[in-house]
Amino acid sequence: MAELAVKTENIIRNIKKLDDFLKKHDIQWSLVSKVLSGDISFLKKILNDDVVQRLHSIGDSRLSSLKAIKKINPSLVTVYIKPPAQNLARNIVEYADISVNTSFKTIEALSIEAIKQNKIHKVIIFIELGELREGVVRDNIVEFYKKVFTLPNIEIIGIGSNLGCMYGIEPTYDKLLQLSLYKQLLEQMFNKKIPLISGGSSITLPLISKKLVPKAVNHFRIGESVFFGTSPLDNKRFQSLSTETFSFNANIIELEEKNNIPDGVISDANIGHTSDHGENESVFKSYRAILDFGMLDVDVKDIIPKDKNLTFVGTTSDMTVYDIGKNINAQLKTKYQVGKKISFNPNYMATARLMHSKFIDLKIE
């Protein structure tokens, strides 16, 4: 099978570097582990390192992952990082010390469950700042907090927002400043302390050194920069973080010289995705490698061949084809052969999908 290889030492070094960087700016942060898909062996490697013990918390959007985290290290503080479904209240209280919320009905259900479990469940309430995903509408925020403050066994520990995920709205200074102003307003109106402003994520990291993050924003939720060394703000490496963390390696199961254009009547029966052919494109032969992965495993748009000379041809449910040209290297020797591997750099979404696939081997280094 094709494999996803992980260099855990590089990831752990990224955690340490980010922790040092954020501490210099008085920012706490949650390590967002959802790309790991709750894999026990992977989580053990990461979560048992000393640096993780010093973090504010570990965040995930899957209950099964939080359950695995608590099993590996019960002392870690866990955060459910998306608004939970109301019917999951019991499990949320059991496995998440903190949850992100935007629905009063759901927080009410969490309150009832927290009483049953004799716990204080902490919540961070997200505000809508333009991304049009999760978040309480700003006109309703005062009334929303007023009602939540009355709920027993619920402690509001933060105000926050999510930017950059769906539409890619940038977390500008002005938008983050709005969170600071709302925090001040709520604390004064209700005489309550709200310790955290959770306004940052991997996309916000480059703004810190530019002094474009208000000082009151003191909590970040970071996944991509830890696991890939980049920030989605510009898709560039962030400071000295390692980008050599994941490698997707697929086996060559066939290698033959074939025409570049299919021969025959093309029907609607195809189930695959192929590269485009021009109407007047001439026919020529080149070597084509069939690899042992397909659309069920990963989207080819999310993986980049490390060999820049490879060209995508097509993909079906469980096989993918790349054109490798004349199959001769600079030394005029055969470049690839059946049984060898072709390596790719997967992005965040590709890695998440590959971690989920039961048809991909996971190699933890």
Image: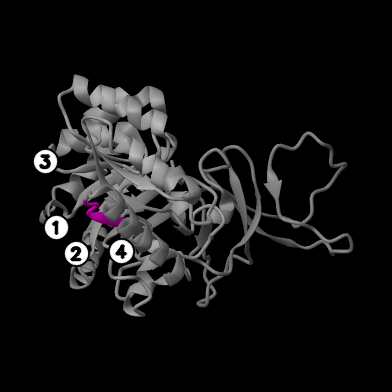
Which is nearer the N-term, disc 1 or disc 4? 1
**Rendered image quadrant of residue 348:** bottom left
For label 3, the residue is 75
At 22% from the left and 38% from the top, the residue drawn is 97
Please tell me whether residue 355 is drawn above or below residue 287 in the rendered image: above
Please tell me whether residue 207 is drawn above or below residue 250 in the rendered image: below
For label 2, the residue is 16
Identify the secondary structure beneath mark 1. Answer: helix
Of tags 4 and 2, which is closer to the observer?
Answer: 4
Please tell me whether residue 147 is drawn above or below residue 48 in the rendered image: above
Query: What distance separates the C-alpha of mark 2 from that of mark 3?
Result: 19 Å
Q: Is residue 115 toward the left or the right of residue 126 in the image?
A: left
Which residues make up the magenta segment? 193-198
Q: Are marks 2 and 1 in contact (CB under 8 Å)?
A: yes
Residue 194 position, x and y percent, is: 24, 52
Query: What distance separates the C-alpha of mark 3 from that of mark 4?
Result: 26 Å
Which is nearer the N-term, disc 2 or disc 3? 2
For label 4, the residue is 217
**Rendered image quadrant of residue 361:** top left
At 27% from the left and 22% from the top, the residue drawn is 112
Q: Is residue 227 visible?
A: no
Please tell me whether residue 20 is drawn above or below residue 12 in the rendered image: below
Query: What distance separates the C-alpha of mark 3 from that of mark 1?
Result: 14 Å
For label 1, the residue is 51
Identify the secondary structure beneath mark 4. Answer: loop
Residue 334 position, x and y percent, is: 53, 65
Q: Is residue 240 toward the left or the right of residue 232 in the image?
A: left
At 42% from the left and 71% from the top, the residue drawn is 173
User: In the image shown, does 83 or 247 lie closer to the viewer?
Assistant: 83
